[in-house]
Image (cartoon, rainbow, N blue to C red):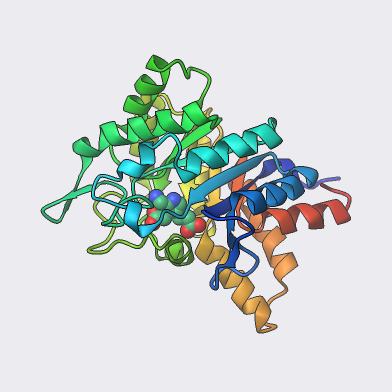
Amino acid sequence: MVRETELTSSDLVLPAFVCEGEGVSDPIASMPGHARQSIDRLLETAKTAVGLGIPGIALFPVIRDELKNSTGTESTSPDGLLPRTIRALKEAHPDLVVITDVALDPYSSDGHDGVVRDGEIVNDETLPLLAAMSVTQAEAGADVVAPSDMMDGRVRVMREALDEAGHTNVAIGSYCAKYASAFYGPFREALDSAPRGGDKKTYQMDPANSREALRELALDEAEGADWVMVKPGLPYLDVIQLLRDHTALPVAAYHVSGEYGQLKAAAERGWLDYDACLLESLTALKRAGADVIFTYGAMEAARLLREAGAG
Ligand code: PBG
């Protein structure tokens, strides 16, 4: 009766990895329970998610090495893996919110979110590529395009390009305060997208900073973001609360691959009760102020909530 925070399956987004082929479900070692799935298998996963009351799915494509290059041209191919996946998902589940990632790294031979020139990640040169990528995704039917690249000014160029192409109803879910975190390790293994040289510290945020998140928030709001995300989740609860207190926009939190992997690994050793720790983690993210929670544990959490009669 006096509980302040109620986690429900309608808060959750399931991130999923899609690959070429048919009947493929290639397990990701550091993310037990998750696999790189071909479109047909992903459709089955999506069906289960919808049945559990999960309203959204976030897609990450595994791009074949021979299609990667320095400007990530595959990211605007209308018949590329991601557009085909979006079309199939929207056809099968028109009400499932399809969220797509806008960043060069899965398509880039350098493994960076922006274009690399003379060892530097160049911000402004990357912007038109991100804008074009978001239009390609919208054209295929994406509901929310989510820039995770952390280039400055990308929300504005994406909004302009989307509107110009007639996609005024496609929302921008901005990764607003995305930190240069070591907790993304398992994700980069899943996509084989780790930077080939250097690190992401010149564009992602310093884990030591929180005021800087307010500057990112001000820019994203002015440029037209429809939600603002904090990433990773649990190590940055203070930042989630800070954004919640300073914006009327929805705040999203990303419980990232390393956070999920940690719980799975400890549970495998019998050191933690996975189910209880998962629900506690997600409840804490919501308590801190997250309206939307991206988590690899979405299906398990939704099942547990349903069993508890709270789904
Ligand atoms: C790519 C991207 C990353 C994640 C989401 N989009 C990795 C990165 O920035 O290196 C991480 C997600 C996770 O760890 O679960 N721009």
In the rendered image of this protein, does residue 180 appear above or below residue 3?
Answer: below
Seen at 33% across and 46% down, the residue is 104
In the image, residue 304 lies at what x, y percent? 80, 58
In the rendered image of this protein, does residue 238 appear above or below residue 168?
Answer: below
Seen at 55% across and 29% down, the residue is 141
> Looking at the image, which is closer to me, 41 or 11?
41
For residue 31, side relative to residue 173 (left or right): right
In the image, residue 176 lies at what x, y percent? 41, 40
Residue 242 visible, this angle: no
For residue 108, side relative to residue 64 (left or right): left
Extreme residue in the left direction:
118
Extreme residue in the front direction:
22
Seen at 26% across and 51% down, the residue is 69
Seen at 51% across and 66% down, the residue is 258
Residue 96 visible, this angle: yes
Q: Say which quadrant the N terminus sits in.
A: top right
> Looking at the image, which is closer to me, 115 or 223?
115
Q: Quadrant of residue 149?
A: top left
Rendered-image quarter of ligand 1: bottom left
In the image, residue 145 lies at what x, y percent? 48, 34
Numbered label tally:
0
In the rendered image of this protein, does residue 83 appear above or below residue 112?
Answer: above
In the image, residue 266 lies at what x, y percent? 62, 78
